Image (cartoon, helix red, strand yellow):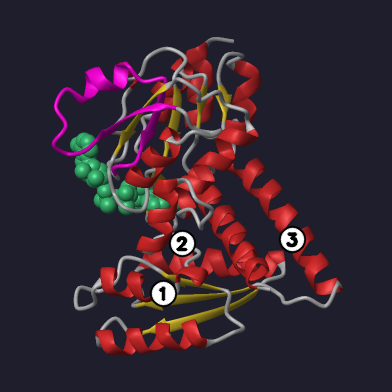
Amino acid sequence: MGTGYLLKQIRQQKIQTSDINCYFCRMQILDGKIVSQTVKNTIKEKTALLKSTGKKTPHLAAVLVGSDGASETYVASKVKNCEEIGFISTLIRLDASIEESLLIETIQKLNADDDVDGILVQLPLPGQISEEKIINLIHPNKDVDGFHPVSVGKMVQGLPTFLPATPYGILMMLEYYQVETKGKHAVVIGRSNIVGRPISILLNRNAYPGNCTVTVCHSHTRNLKDICLQADIIVAALGKPGFLTSDMVKEKAVVIDVGISRVPDATKKSGFTLKGDVDFIHVAPKCSFITPVPGGVGLMTIAALMTNTYNACVLKN
Ligand code: NAD
């Protein structure tokens, strides 16, 4: 059975990405379904134990401003995961046109509510509201997204804190599959506060997963292809579907695809397909490990958020 045939089968979704491991013996899928389910099962068991011993049940409050399709989907998934794990969840919906002061008031109430362990404000926020102001307002002890400057400062110093969910989820995945990171050259494409910058800091820290030499690339980086070709590990987090092509990846690289873009697709009921930043079908055969989209980092983000919420509850009591 040739590689071309297999790639066609994958492309036509006749075989699952989780089945690919047995075909390409040198490449392994980092399967977000398996790892996230393992993490969530552990949290579920621990939560049941909290309840059975009369302790407080973790409670996540999610705030959704407006009705952006992708944000609706993300928040619904977070709430559903809370329910599956046995957490309490509260969803607060606010109109897209609200004044900033109303959101400030909402956050202040959630900060003051002793039953709420974690607060999540779904980004992006409408233009009239300062994301920075809102993030800074969330109490650091309830900052389960790990975006508050106190959380970020602690992360940079290597102190215990809530790690931002997507980078934390990537670390969980690398650890689960025992991907070697020490001494490796990691190239991160993207420098956003929620993905690129924090994962670059975490891969660089003196710990496992970590101890990488990290290059952070962005929209003004020159010779990106040459830099990527030097990478043992590539984290693609730029939001450009299929951007990382096979000619940018060296043999046996580890490729982490963070991108999630909705690409119009008339054949789908929803009218779109989710695409990552990596040209998976051509890049995968060169890799030692690679994450698929969907079914990769996105699922890990939720597992990490659930872990942070559980810890927020336990640390408080
Ligand atoms: P962002 O728009 O805030 O940042 C994008 C970054 O990519 C910027 O730093 C920019 O400089 C860089 N960039 C843009 N074009 C580039 C180019 N041609 N070459 C090199 N760098 C370039 O995006 P973000 O919030 O970090 O999200 C990135 C992607 O990850 C998006 O697709 C987003 O939907 C996805 N995402 C996924 C998850 C998840 O759970 N899987 C979580 C957060 C974000």
Residue 257 sits above or below residue 108 on the image: above
Tell us which disc is closer to us: 1 or 2: 1
SS for callout 1: loop
Answer few, some or many: residues within 10 Å of disc 3's Cα (few below 14, many 20 plus, some between 14 and 19).
many
SS for callout 2: loop
Per the rendering, the mark at residue 138 is 1
Residue 33 sits above or below residue 209 on the image: below
Q: Earlier in the sequence, mark 3 or mark 2?
A: 3
Answer few, some or many: residues within 10 Å of disc 1's Cα (few below 14, many 20 plus, some between 14 and 19).
many
Q: How far apart in space, not on screen, are marks 3 and 2 (Cα)?
A: 19 Å
> Any magenta on residue 220?
yes
Magenta segment boundaries in residue numbering: 212-238
Per the rendering, the mark at residue 44 is 3
Tell us which disc is closer to us: 3 or 1: 1
Residue beneath the point at 62% across and 23% down: 21
Q: Position of residue 6 (x, y in %)?
A: 54, 19
| Horizontal arrangement in the rendering, residue 204 relative to residue 100 (left or right) | right
| Horizontal arrangement in the rendering, residue 106 relative to residue 57 (left or right) | left
Mark 1 and mark 2 residues within 8 Å of each other at the beta carbon: yes
> Any magenta on residue 221?
yes
Q: Earlier in the sequence, mark 1 or mark 2?
A: 1
Q: Specify the quadrant of the image occupied by residue 259.
A: top left
**Label 2 CB less than 8 angstroms from ligand 1:** no
Residue, disc 2: 145
| Amino acid of disc 3 | Lys
Mark 3 and mark 2 residues within 8 Å of each other at the beta carbon: no
| Amino acid of disc 1 | Ile
